C-alpha cells in the first residue's frame, strides 16, 4: 500500500523563470580620465653596484629598472624555455638574485628591490 501512495504523488511543477528586463546601456560614457603615474614608481632610485652591471649606474625609476632587466633577460635568452615564469640567471644576474641560479619572475622584483636605494 505504501508503494501505491508514492506512485500517486505528482512531481512538483517547476516555476518558469521570470524574465529579467534587458540591462540599459549607458547613454553617454564619460571620457576616460588620463591616468597619472604613482609618484613612488616614478622616483629615481640609485641601483647598487651589482645591479648597475645589468641596468646601468645612473638613477632610474623602478619601472625603468624592471624594463631594463627584462630587456637584458630577453637579449641574453635567460627565460626558461619550458616554464616561461622562471628566469635562469647568468653571472651578473646571479649576484643580483643573491646567488640563486633560477628565480620566478615574481620573486625577481622582490630581489631587485633590495638593490635599489
Image (cartoon, rainbow, N blue to C red):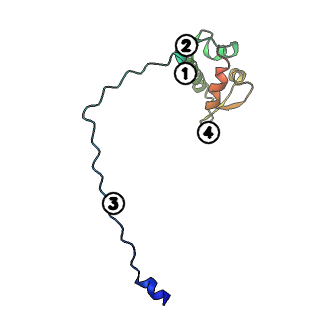
Q: Is residue 2 left or right of residue 46?
A: left
Between the C-alphas of marks 4 and 2, the distance is 33 Å
Label 1 vs 2, first from the N-terminus: 2
Q: Residue at x 30, y 27 (%)?
A: 30
**Label 3 belongs to which residue?**
17
Label 1 vs 4, first from the N-terminus: 1
Viewer-nearest of discs 1 and 3: 3
Q: Residue at x 27, y 39 (%)?
A: 25
Label 3 vs 4, first from the N-terminus: 3
**Label 1 belongs to which residue?**
67
Using the image, determine if residue 95 lies above or below residue 107. above
**Label 4 belongs to which residue?**
83
Q: Residues within 10 Å of mark 3 (few under 14, many from 20)?
A: few
Q: Residues within 10 Å of mark 1 (few under 14, many from 20)?
A: few
**Label 2 belongs to which residue?**
43
Q: Is residue 64 left or right of residue 36?
A: right
Q: In the image shown, does 33 or 58 lie closer to the viewer?
A: 33
Task: Name the residue at the left extreme.
Answer: 27
Q: Residues within 10 Å of mark 4 (few under 14, many from 20)?
A: few
User: Where residue 3 sits: x, y (%)?
Assistant: 48, 87
User: Where residue 68 sits: x, y (%)?
Assistant: 57, 19
Q: Mark 4 falls on what kind of element?
A: loop
Between the C-alphas of marks 1 and 2, the distance is 15 Å
Q: Quadrant of the C terminus?
A: top right
Query: Mark 3–mark 2 contact, CB under 8 Å?
Result: no
Q: Residue at x 60, y 25 (%)?
A: 73
Using the image, determine if residue 117 lies above or below residue 110. above
Query: Mark 3–mark 4 contact, CB under 8 Å?
Result: no
Amino acid at each position: 500500500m505504501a508503494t501505491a501512495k508514492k506512485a500517486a504523488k505528482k512531481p512538483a511543477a517547476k516555476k518558469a523563470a521570470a524574465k529579467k528586463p534587458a540591462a540599459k546601456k549607458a547613454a553617454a560614457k564619460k571620457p576616460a580620465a588620463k591616468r597619472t603615474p604613482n609618484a613612488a614608481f616614478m622616483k629615481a632610485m640609485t641601483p647598487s653596484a651589482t645591479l648597475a652591471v645589468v641596468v646601468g649606474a645612473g638613477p632610474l625609476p623602478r619601472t625603468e629598472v624592471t624594463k631594463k632587466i627584462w630587456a637584458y633577460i630577453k637579449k641574453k635568452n635567460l627565460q626558461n624555455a619550458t616554464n616561461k615564469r622562471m628566469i635562469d640567471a647568468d653571472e651578473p644576474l646571479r649576484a643580483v638574485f643573491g646567488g640563486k641560479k633560477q628565480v620566478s619572475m615574481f620573486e625577481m622584483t622582490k630581489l631587485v628591490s633590495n638593490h635599489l636605494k
